[in-house]
Image (cartoon, rainbow, N blue to C red):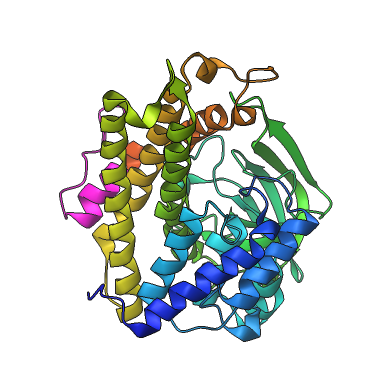
Amino acid sequence: MDLNAGPEYIDFRENVLSFLEKNKHMAGKARTPVRPSSEELKWQKKLIDNGYAARTIPKKYGGYGAQSDVLKSRIIAEEFSKANIPMGMANQGISMLVPTLLELGSDDQKNEWISKTISGEVIWCQGYSEPGSGSDLASLQTKAIVDGDDFIINGQKIWTSGAQIADMMFCLVRTEPEAAKHKGISYILIDMKTPGIEVRPLMTMTGHAEFNEVFFTDVRVPKNQIVGKRGEGWYVANATLTHERGMLGDPNQSATRLNEIIDLMHQETINGEKLINNPIHLDRLMKLQARVLSMSFNSLRLLTASHKKLDAKMAKLIVKLNGCQLNHDLAGFAIDLLGELGTIYGKSNHDHGSGKWQWKYMFDLGLIIGGGTAQIQKNIISEIGLGMPREPKPMVNGKK
């Protein structure tokens, strides 16, 4: 692709820089896994109105309605990252459900949910994993039976990020118990205020309950809340998983994190010398910078493929695997730069940045597992991306 910026793109970059300068006071801090504040909602609206969030989502669904443009998308990401200003909200509803609905949802579902979701009015969580079905997601046992115009759902989900604050859940349930395990699943939208839903927090090593377990006891959901066709939820679920992996390994997030680390190296000193001048630290920085750049270039490949409607299977498959490990390594580098202060987590007069790097380091370790473990991702890359033979099934009672 031609990366030379013509007059149109030079003008566009100037417009982005002008917007950031005029509105940076509204941006606030990076997004956190809680309900957005009124200030964050205003910032999200400002971004959508100016085409810096929900850029290619049609106007009739509350988006900006622009045509896909690889270079403009790259310019937006670059300038927001350089300015250390958060881009639009990225959460399970916006980054995972909305593109799934645009591809596979009904007109009623698109009209009902997309605008409310991208604006931050409605927050979603994902009901996929269960205690007995994590990596083998298709073995899930949460079931739904038909009763008139409703499904009655019973079962349990686990590792449900944000369930404690979510308004809605997109959930996988077994509606065809006699069908093969991949064939009997449906993808259903559930109001979290429905009677019979119980959310219990799960404390993680960060000291916070980012995850939850969710119990369903005779939960009634209208049958028209299925996305796609009944029993074809595995196909819909995989569309969502593709978007989830892209969100978790987002190269723009890595680039922003790298810029924060560079700022840190200019601020912190050892014996009066800035860390940016330390050759050992500088060598580590350059190696991480090369990895960030490679992921950014890979995102350009994906944007181009999407724009031209080309298959970019391998380029998509590596995003989650490489991106999550890269973010974890960046946070680890920041902790090392802080020296003994990097070991502090919690209330302390010597704490830097409210322990954000320590939190990111621990949380990102979980993301290497979440959304499909690194080991599962390697199998997917091997089998689907490279066409290698499937791993042999283990023997159970003398049988495969």
Q: Nearer the viewer, residue 258 or 394?
A: 258
Q: Is residue 309 above or below residue 351?
A: below
Quarter assignment of residue 5: bottom left
**Farthest residue in the front direction?**
272
Residue 57 visible from this viewpoint: yes
- Residue segment shown in magenta: 377-400
Question: Can you give x and y, in whole percent of width and height, for residue 255 in the image?
Answer: 41, 49
Question: Can you give x and y, in whole percent of width and height, for residue 279 in the image?
Answer: 26, 26
Q: Is residue 148 left or right of residue 353?
A: right
Q: In the rendered image, which quarter contains the C terminus? A: top left
Residue at image position (17%, 54%) is 386
Residue at image position (68%, 74%) is 115
Question: Can you give x and y, in whole percent of width and height, for residue 262 in the image?
Answer: 42, 39
Residue at image position (39%, 84%) is 8
Q: In the rendered image, which quarter contains the N terminus? A: bottom left
Q: Is residue 263 magenta?
A: no
Q: Is residue 217 above or below residue 176?
A: above
Q: Is residue 197 above or below residue 299?
A: above
